[in-house]
């Protein structure tokens, strides 16, 4: 059924039904667990199959020690599987972080003494630089590598050209690999992961080639300088890993509903390694992507996220003894008067989210309907060229977006000499005569504000055209960058107001005596959360991710205020976050548990076929031959058929799946002697009449689901929708007097 439109075959001739397995002789039916591509799983049927499997294992474990060992292994297989998933996710994330950082710096220069080091690592061994400097003696730009050491227009143009060429090369390789080897490796992956976790089958989306190509190409896409991130694709990569390891354990590999427990844990591990936020990862999986999330899945998700974070911390890809680059330590607490600018940042985040979602969806629709969609490689190359061309002149758009966010979050210290910290301040005795990083904004700060304002406009617009291209493209980091820039601008403005007008009633108590009372980096952090919340409409998990991401637990109230404000403002323009909007844009069947439906119809109004349509295709329980059933399977493409007493009475007996019926007929032709085309098929316990008269009959009652979900034709649609969402149904049969 199409769960976007509940009227597409949900009631009568749909995909599959719950099979009520009551007899151990139906063990062979456990092998019928695979679904066709682009079909929806039957949660009730798969959970029933797992319950039968568990019952059989429990019974056999009492027969011998070997069966007891196998039963114990089966009980622990879930924990063992998520352990492997967490370890592999942490390893992949560490490799991606190191590779993306190195290739991003490669656009600007290289470390001749050790080419495998990125810019920061290369400068660690230098004695003539600080962390905030943009260069050091051991790091050479490409113009310097070519022997041009003077700073002039020719040097600038050469570095400019090489920067653009590297960006084009990276994006060309990325889009070529995606198009030729793994078409499913493009995009964020989160909308599809949500759809898969809701029970939809997309063959190959979590395959090994998708895993490999997406891991490589997300490094290339980020290194190309495109306005995208690798955090969303890391969730997709982690789910690919979860899918791979689930096949090592038949308990999960042969049962699609059980497999989704592993995928939920894998998505939590993906967020854990993307942001260094294991608790936030579990909440993200619960709030944003998972459809079926029992309590044991939450425990295993937590364990999987913990293992993944531990492995990433052991690799230490950022070299700062933290899981993330954005770890901050502020020396000034926040004050009550700052709630007003924090709420204003929330308003900005909601407005930006509504603006981005609207125009990104318009652009994606245009891409799908126009000829531009036929030339994805050309689109990627054009967007890359424009991005690199506009990004290089501005130092805040030239550098990696993660480094930009790190700079914006960071508080100014006495030894910081970047433009963001260029204040006309005196040297303070209490700082050992070092410069006091607080005062009237100097020329550097003023220039930085203009550059950041231009970067805000550039990133806000370019992300609209970048998200949805045929390269791995996450949305977390670009959204956070837009919010962080806006937050730093507003924070610096509030800081200058507090410095120049300390006697205002707002600043009177907090800023008395000229002491510092405003931290611009905190505003950047709050703005980043607000913008991301406005785009995705995440709430609880976003707040937890932000304080885990930065280590700023004491600033949780400003973050909560901004995130809630951004959600309220964004919801005023539309309830959907960007991921739900892309699910509907792509036409995936997804019934959102959070969405409210207001229907005044009943089941009879939307069932298929409706009254007056051609009659329903049914199977009679004891009046059809093998040939008639084979003809029915050839002529009709329904995935299941109601079994009735007769076509005249239409009294419901049960429901049989197309796949099971086709398999049974094929096996009967091969394995049972005497079964021919005119053999009568019975879905009843007893065969009427003498068995020695005519061709041998075929009994198929064991595959008949005698208790399919049924409703009456007068059932309100609100009840029908709740049944589909809460029970995970694939179809429901509509009856009238049976």
Image: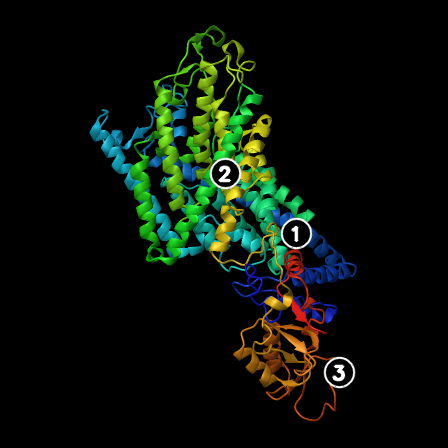
| Nearer to us in this view, 684 or 733 | 733
Element type where label 2 sits in the image: helix
- Work out whether residue 518 can be spotted: yes
Q: Is residue 63 left or right of residue 523?
A: right
Q: Are marks 3 and 1 in contact (CB under 8 Å)?
A: no
Q: Are marks 3 and 2 in contact (CB under 8 Å)?
A: no
Instruction: State the separation of the CA atoms marked 3 and 1.
Output: 42 Å
Category of crowding for the residue at label 1, using alpha-carbon neighbours closer than 10 angstroms: few (below 14), some (14–19), many (at least 20): some
Residue at 39% x, 37% y is 459
Residue at 32% x, 23% y is 137
Q: Which residue is mark 1?
A: 77
Q: Position of residue 487 (x, y in %)?
A: 46, 29
Q: Nearer the viewer, mark 3 or mark 1?
A: 3
Q: Is residue 158 left or right of residue 425?
A: left
Q: Which mark is residue 686?
A: 3
Q: Position of residue 33 (x, y in %)?
A: 61, 65
Q: Quadrant of the N terminus?
A: bottom right
């Amino acid at each position: 059924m199409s769960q976007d439109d509940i009227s597409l075959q949900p009631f009568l001739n749909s995909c599959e039904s719950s099979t009520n397995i009551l007899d151990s002789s139906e063990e062979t039916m456990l092998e019928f667990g695979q679904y066709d591509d682009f079909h929806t799983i039957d949660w009730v049927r798969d959970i029933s199959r797992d319950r039968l499997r568990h019952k059989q294992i429990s019974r056999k474990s009492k027969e011998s020690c070997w069966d007891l060992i196998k039963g114990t292994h089966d009980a622990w297989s879930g924990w063992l599987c998520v352990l492997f998933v967490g370890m592999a996710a942490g390893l992949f994330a560490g490799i991606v972080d190191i590779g993306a950082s190195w290739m991003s710096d490669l656009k600007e220069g290289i470390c001749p003494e050790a080419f495998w080091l990125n810019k920061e690592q290369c400068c660690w061994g230098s004695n003539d630089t600080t962390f905030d400097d943009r260069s050091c003696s051991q790091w050479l730009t490409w113009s310097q590598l070519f022997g041009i050491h003077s700073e002039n227009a020719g040097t600038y143009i050469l570095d400019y050209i090489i920067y653009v060429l590297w960006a084009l090369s990276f994006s060309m390789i990325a889009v070529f690999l995606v198009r030729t080897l793994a078409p499913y490796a493009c995009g964020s992956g989160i909308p599809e992961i949500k759809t898969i976790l809701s029970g939809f089958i997309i063959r190959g989306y979590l395959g090994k080639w998708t895993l490999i190509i997406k891991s490589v190409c997300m490094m290339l896409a980020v290194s190309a300088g495109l306005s995208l991130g690798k955090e969303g694709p890391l969730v997709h990569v982690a789910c690919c890993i979860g899918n791979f390891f689930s096949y090592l354990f038949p308990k999960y590999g042969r049962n699609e509903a059980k497999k989704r427990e592993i995928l939920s844990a894998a998505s939590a591990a993906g967020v854990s390694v993307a942001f260094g936020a294991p608790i936030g990862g579990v909440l993200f999986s619960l709030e944003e992507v998972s459809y079926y999330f029992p309590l044991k899945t939450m425990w295993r998700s937590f364990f999987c996220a913990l293992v993944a974070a531990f492995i990433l911390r052991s690799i230490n890809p950022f070299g700062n003894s933290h899981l993330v680059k954005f770890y901050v330590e502020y020396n000034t607490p926040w004050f009550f008067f700052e709630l007003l600018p924090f709420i204003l940042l929330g308003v900005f985040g909601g407005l930006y989210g509504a603006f981005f979602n609207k125009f990104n969806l318009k652009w994606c629709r245009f891409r799908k309907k126009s000829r531009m969609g036929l030339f994805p490689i050309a689109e990627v190359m054009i967007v890359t060229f424009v991005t690199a061309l506009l990004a290089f002149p501005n130092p805040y758009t030239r550098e990696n977006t993660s480094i930009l966010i790190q700079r914006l979050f960071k508080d100014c210290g006495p030894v910081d000499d970047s433009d963001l910290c260029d204040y006309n301040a005196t040297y303070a005795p209490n700082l050992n005569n070092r410069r006091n990083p607080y005062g009237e904004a100097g020329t550097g700060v003023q220039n930085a504000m203009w550059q950041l304002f231009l970067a805000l406009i550039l990133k806000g617009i370019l992300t609209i055209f970048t998200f949805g291209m045929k390269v791995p493209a996450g949305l977390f980091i670009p959204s956070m960058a837009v919010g962080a820039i806006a937050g730093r601008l507003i924070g610096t403005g509030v800081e200058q107001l507090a410095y120049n007008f300390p006697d205002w009633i707002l600043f009177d108590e907090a800023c008395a005596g000229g002491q510092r009372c405003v931290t611009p980096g905190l505003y950047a952090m709050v703005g980043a959360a607000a913008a991301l919340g406005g785009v995705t409409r995440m709430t609880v998990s976003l707040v937890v991710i932000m304080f885990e991401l930065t280590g700023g637990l004491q600033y949780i109230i400003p973050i909560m205020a901004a995130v809630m404000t951004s959600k309220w403002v964004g919801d005023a323009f539309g309830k959907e976050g960007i991921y739900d909007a892309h699910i509907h844009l792509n036409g995936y069947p997804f019934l959102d548990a959070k969405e409210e439906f207001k229907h005044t119809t009943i089941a009879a109004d939307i069932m298929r076929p409706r009254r007056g349509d051609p009659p329903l295709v049914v199977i009679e329980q004891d009046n059809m031959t093998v040939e008639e059933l084979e003809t029915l399977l050839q002529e009709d493409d329904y995935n299941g058929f109601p079994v009735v007493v007769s076509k005249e009475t239409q009294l419901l007996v049960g429901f049989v799946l197309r796949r099971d019926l086709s398999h049974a007929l094929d096996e009967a032709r091969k394995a049972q002697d005497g079964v021919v085309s005119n053999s009568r098929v019975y879905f009843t316990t007893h065969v009427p009449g003498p068995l020695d008269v005519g061709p041998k009959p075929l009994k198929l009652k064991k595959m008949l689901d005698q208790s399919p979900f049924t409703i009456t034709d007068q059932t309100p649609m609100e009840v029908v929708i709740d049944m589909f969402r809460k029970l995970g149904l694939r179809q429901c049969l509509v009856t009238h007097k049976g």
